Amino acid sequence: MAGGTILNLFNWLAPTQEAGLPWWPLALVIGMLLLINVVNNRVAPNSHYLLWSFASSVILLALGLLDGNTFTDMGLSWTHYLSGLIWAGICIGAVTLVYVVGIIFKPTRNAFRDDRHAELSGGRLAFHALLEVPFGTVLLEEIAFRAVLFSMLARRYGLVWGIVLSSILFGLWHVLPSIGSHEQNPALGSVVGQGRRGNIFAIALSVLTTTLAGFVFCALRLMSGSVLAPMGLHWATNGLGYAFSWAIIRRTRRLPQ
């Protein structure tokens, strides 16, 4: 029984490549992702974010199903939720451990400082970390990039190209939100510099790191057979990152100058 449970943690499920699939459904999904990205970051970044993100996730999922992707193809099958949850729990625990170790030492502690979280109340932080991040950002991005887009790409171009292209597109998804981030995060600003050059470096670094994260998320999704696994890691890096950043800023402000 125990051996079977362990084996079930490694499903390595990938969509089967099919010949002759049309290109336009893929173009439609990518075009919609571009629209969602602009709305989220430029048109209405704070207005009804949760509702907009959830609606976008539902529409993207519907487009994936209409394209012929099964729930198993997209990592959404009930039969693999347990392995997905277990891997999600492992990832959350690992990230928590890394963050705890990171804030112990001053050189790495400064990497958590982000002025965007400085004025958040405890209630607003909880809402952001426990609702907006998991049910807005994480749900939308994992449904979009590790479920729908990855499956559509893998069925057309094979597993390798599915991983590579979905990860690159995930990196490009972060161009708009990374603009000006070097001015709000002192640690990032100290690495990339200030001004236009610093902004360009910050954007490039964001695209690079999130592209690499996309590869890791795809590996978790394939290994577990469920998007719940990358969802867990995705939430941990973002949601816990906000919480640790907020706690460090509050603690620093309480210390005598």
Image (cartoon, helix red, strand yellow):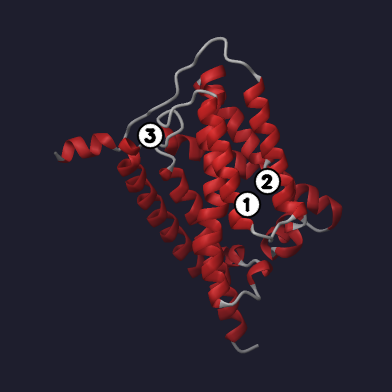
User: Looking at the image, which residue is at 62% across and 16% down?
Assistant: 22
Tell which residue pokes out farthest to the right in this image: 196
**Can residue 105 be seen at all in this image of the molecule?**
no
**Can residue 13 be seen at all in this image of the molecule?**
yes
User: Looking at the image, which residue is at 55% across and 57% down?
Assistant: 133
* Element type at mark 1: helix
Question: Which mark lies nearer to you, 1 or 3?
Answer: 1
Tell me the number on the disc at residue 174.
2
The kind of residue on which mark 2 rests is His
Tell me the number on the disc at residue 239.
none
Tell me the number on the disc at residue 225.
3
Q: Position of residue 182 (x, y in %)?
A: 74, 58
The kind of residue on which mark 3 rests is Gly
Residue 249, above or below 8 = below
Distance (Cα) linking label 3 and label 2:
26 Å
Quarter holding the N terminus?
A: top left
Mark 3 and mark 2 lie on one chain; the one further toward the N terminus is: 2
Q: Which residue is mark 1?
A: 52
User: Camera-side residue: 244 or 80?
Assistant: 80
User: Looking at the image, which residue is at 36% across and 43% down?
Assistant: 84
Give neighbour class at mark 2: few <14, some 14-19, many 20+ (Cα, 10 Å): many
User: Looking at the image, which residue is at 67% across and 67% down?
Assistant: 116
Mark 1 and mark 2 lie on one chain; the one further toward the N terminus is: 1
The kind of residue on which mark 1 rests is Trp
11 displayed left or right of 42: left
Q: Position of residue 158 (x, y in %)?
A: 52, 18
